[in-house]
Image: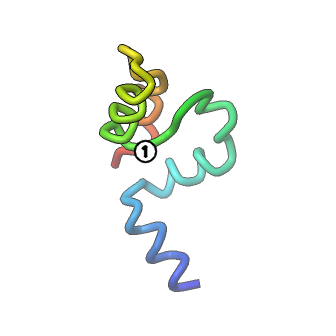
Amino acid sequence: MATHDSFLNRLNISADNRLKITTEFDSLFKGAVGALPALTEYCEYLERKLRQGESNSHRWLCA
């Protein structure tokens, strides 16, 4: 269990947000999910101007 806890701590996501993400993932995210730089790279690859899901990723994945 210690390995599992250290992995979750390295994600740098609060315990409340981890619970919310794991129990309501499908309702929180409808498209690509990831850190903002990864979303930017993904959208550039797809030649999209807007990063869909940016606010949810920032809200739930950033500490």
Residue name at image x 45 percent, y 24 percent: 46
**Relative depth, front residue between 45 and 19:** 45
For residue 31, above or below residue 18: above
In the rendered image, which quarter is residue 58 located in? top left
In the rendered image, which quarter is residue 43 located in? top left
Q: Amino acid at mark 1?
A: Leu
The residue singled out by tag 1 in the image is: 61
Q: Position of residue 63 (x, y in %)?
A: 34, 49
Structural crowding at the residue carrying mark 1, measured as other residues with C-alpha within 10 Å and reported as few (<14), some (14–19) or many (≥20): some
- The quadrant of the rendering that contains the N terminus is bottom right
In the rendered image, which quarter is residue 37 located in? top left
Q: Position of residue 60 (x, y in %)?
A: 46, 40
Q: Secondary structure at mark 1?
A: helix
Which residue appears farthest toward the bottom when viewing the image? 2
For residue 39, above or below residue 21: above
Which residue appears farthest toward the left when viewing the image? 37
